[in-house]
Amino acid sequence: MKYSIHDGPGIRTAVFFKGCPLNCQWCHNPESQRYDQELFYWPDRCIGCGQCLANCPNGAIRTLSGKLEFRRDLCKVCGACCKVCHAGARSLVAKRMSVSEVMAEVEKDLIFYDESGGGVTFTGGEAMMQPAFLAELLKACRKKEIHTAVETCGFVKPEILQTISAEADLFLYDLKLMDSQKHQAYTGAANDLVLANLRWLAERQAEVLVRVPVIPGCNDDQENLHQLGEFLTSLPRVKELHLLPYHRAGVDKYKRLGREYLLPEVQAPENEQMERIKETLEEYGLKVKIGG
Ligand code: SF4
Ligand code: SF4
C-alpha cells in the first residue's frame, strides 16, 4: 500500500505479509490471516459472462438453475478464473515477491520518505512469521537509509523478535487485552508471550509505539483500561500510546473470502467514548493519541 499515513511517522509504504499466529475476531485484514493463497469473490460485480465456468479446471464453478454457483470447497485457488474475469469479480489475495521486487516498489517512493520523514512499514498478518525474508528486507532498507517499522501482534518467538529488533528502527506494537483468558477467547491465544515480548523490547531500549485497537464491548471496560495503564507505566521508555477506534471497513472482506464475521453487532465507538478512554489512560501519565 502506497502513501500510508497511519502506519508510523511520515508518508510510508506498507508491505503486507500473509499469515498471522492470532485470529482476532475484529481483524480488518482477514485476507492476511491465513498463510495460504486465497480468492476474493465479489458476486455483485459478476456480469454472468461464464468465462470463469469455462476456464475452471476443478469444477468449482457450476450452473445451478441457470445461475452460476461458486463452490469454494472445490476451489484449488489456481487463479485461472481471475485471469479471464474482466468484470473484476475474482482476484487472488496475495502474490509471491522476492526481496528485490519488494525493494523496487519501495524505492519508487524514496522522495516521499525523504520529504515527510517516512519510510516503510512491514505489517500483515504478522511480518515476523516470515523472519528470514523480513530480516533481508530490513537490511536492504538500512543500506538505502530508509526508515523501517515493523507492526506486530507480539505473539512471536522471543528469539525471532530479538533478531528482528537488531534490524528494525521502530516497532508498532499492538496490545489488545490485558486479561489472558479474554485474549485467548477473542484472538485464539493467551497474552503472556505478547506482554513478555513488549517488556523485553522496552527494557532493551528499542523504539516502540504501543497501539490499542478499541473494540466496544471487548476491551473498552474500565478494568482492562486500568490494567493497561498500570502495565504500560511499569515499562521503561514506553510513554506514548495510540488508540485505534474499531471500524467496520473490513467486514465486507469476510464475505468476499466466504467467511463468517464473528462480531456483527459491534459498532464503531463514538468520539465521546474515545475521549473518555483517552482521559482514563492519560491519568497514568501516558501521552495518548486517538488514531494511528
Ligand atoms: S468471469 Fe467474472 S464476470 Fe464472468 S461469470 Fe465469471 S465471475 Fe462473472
Ligand atoms: S481459482 Fe481455480 S479452482 Fe478456484 S474457482 Fe478459480 S479457476 Fe476454479
Image: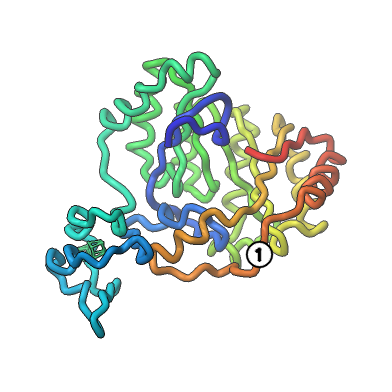
Q: Is residue 126 above or below residue 184?
A: above
Q: Quadrant of the C terminus?
A: top right
Q: Position of residue 197 (x, y in %)?
A: 58, 43
Which corner quadrant of the figure contains ligand 1?
bottom left
Q: Is residue 97 above or below residue 249?
A: above
Q: Quadrant of the N terminus?
A: top left
Q: Residue at x 67, y 61 (%)?
A: 267
Q: Amino acid at mark 1?
A: Val
Q: Is residue 185 above or below residue 111?
A: below
* Near-viewer residue (162 or 153): 153
Helix, strand or loop under label 1: loop
Q: Is residue 268 left or right of residue 153?
A: right
Residue that mark 1 sits on: 266
Give the colour scheme shown: rainbow
Q: Residue at x 70, y 29 (%)?
A: 237
Q: Position of residue 60 (x, y in %)?
A: 21, 72
* Near-viewer residue (167 or 145): 145
Q: Residue at x 43, y 42 (%)?
A: 128
Neighbours of disc 1 within 10 Å: few (<14), some (14-19), many (20+): some
Q: Residue at x 38, y 36 (%)?
A: 134
Q: Is residue 16 above or below residue 176?
A: above
For residue 67, what is the image quadrant? bottom left
